[in-house]
Image: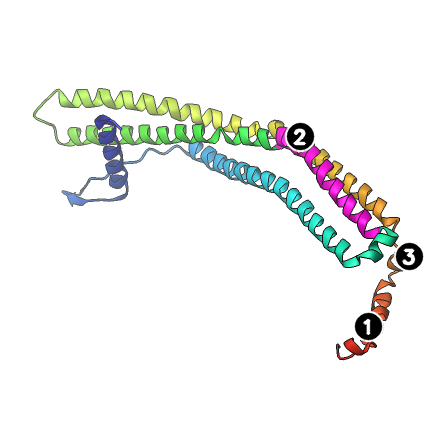
């Protein structure tokens, strides 16, 4: 940072403190108090922009989390499929149920998830990330406006001080008034630009996100359809009576019957 830039930052920090603090009173006048410029239209749009910024950044995070969750879910399915296959052992190999489930899960992980990864990144993650990439530039412009406003307010306070207490140098007031006018123009130009363009950015969010939202729905639909199709293939290996009892709500009774048979074994007879 240059020396002049450092001095500007110090002056702006001082102005901010002076806006909040009244140092003292002399002859009923506030000393060290700087009147802050307020623009309600800008403040309204700034609040709306902050809501958009927060929502967009959260959407970016959640969109990435969704893809991570799909990978985590299929990885978990892989582990439970391998465990079930080991649990069934030869019994599962004879009727094919555990091996079929394991193969279905492997195919879902190897084919469906990998096939969806690229399109999801291209149509959902990357567009959302590009939209969020504009926020640092907008925030830099908002910060610059704040700095210009502080410069303008500080110079206005100087003019008022010179009016109330003229300096021996009669040229000081005109010079300060000229600097104040230039600062005012710089502030108002940036303030007007932000006040006009922030609403445009906010309004663009819907047409921009629509294609990604549609892609998200279609990708979710494809994943669910693929998962349903593969699990439906496994269902044919399940016992027909078990499926019927589940459909009629009688599965709990069958489970309890098997548990009772386990309890009747001597080695498990003490289990309640």
Name the image quarter holding residue 84.
bottom right
Position above or below: 106 against 115: below
Lateral position of residue 163 relative to residue 153, left or right: left
**Dominant secondary structure (helix, strand or loop) of the stretch shown in magenta:** helix
Q: How is the image coloured?
A: rainbow
Circle 2 sits in a helix, a strand or a loop, which is it?
helix
Q: Which residues are magenta?
A: 97-124
Q: Is residue 216 left or right of residue 182?
A: right
Residue sitting nearer the eye, 61 or 177:
61
Helix, strand or loop for disc 1: helix
How far apart are the two marked residues, 3 and 1, measured between alpha carbons?
Answer: 23 Å
Q: Is residue 156 visible?
A: no
Task: Check residue 119 in the rendering and tell me which mark sits there, or answer none.
Answer: 2
Alpha carbon distance from label 2 to label 3: 39 Å
- Residue of label 1: 262
For marks 2 and 3 on the same chain, the one whose residue lies earlier in the sequence:
2
Tell me: residue 3, above or below residue 245.
Answer: above
Q: Which residue is mark 3?
A: 244
Task: Pinpoint residue 252: horizontal percent, then vertical percent.
Answer: 83, 65
Quadrant occupied by the C terminus: bottom right
Residue 124 in view, yes or no: yes
Category of crowding for the residue at label 1, using alpha-carbon neighbours closer than 10 angstroms: few (below 14), some (14–19), many (at least 20)? some
Q: Which residue is at 80% across, 78% downward?
A: 266
Choose the circle earlier in sequence order: 1 or 2. 2
Residue 96 percent coordinates (x, y) = 85, 50
Residue 230, percent from left and from top = 81, 42
């Amino acid at each position: 940072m240059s020396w002049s830039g450092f001095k500007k930052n110090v002056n702006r920090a001082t102005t901010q403190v002076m806006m909040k603090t009244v140092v003292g009173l002399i002859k009923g006048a506030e000393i060290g108090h700087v009147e802050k410029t307020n623009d309600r239209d800008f403040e309204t749009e700034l609040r709306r922009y902050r809501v958009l910024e927060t929502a967009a950044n959260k959407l970016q995070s959640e969109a990435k989390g969704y893809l991570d969750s799909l990978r985590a879910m299929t990885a978990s399915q892989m582990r439970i499929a391998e465990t079930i296959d080991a649990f069934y052992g030869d019994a599962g190999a004879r009727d094919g149920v555990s091996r079929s489930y394991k193969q279905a899960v492997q195919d879902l992980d190897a084919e469906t998830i990998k096939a969806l990864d690229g399109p999801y990144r291209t149509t959902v993650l990357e567009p959302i990330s590009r939209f969020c990439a504009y926020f640092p530039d907008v925030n830099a412009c908002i910060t610059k406006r704040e700095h210009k406003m502080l410069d303008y307010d500080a110079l206005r306070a100087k003019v008022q001080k010179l009016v109330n207490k003229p300096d021996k140098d009669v040229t000081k007031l005109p010079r300060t008034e000229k600097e104040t006018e230039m600062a005012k123009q710089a502030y108002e130009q940036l303030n007007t630009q932000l006040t006009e363009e922030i609403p445009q950015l906010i309004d663009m969010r819907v047409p921009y996100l629509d294609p990604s939202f549609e892609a998200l729905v279609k990708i979710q639909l494809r994943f669910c359809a693929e998962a349903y199709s593969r699990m439906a293939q496994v269902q044919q290996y399940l016992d027909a009576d078990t499926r019927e009892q589940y459909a009629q709500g009688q599965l709990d009774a069958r489970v309890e019957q098997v548990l009772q048979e386990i309890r009747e074994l001597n080695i498990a007879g003490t289990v309640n």
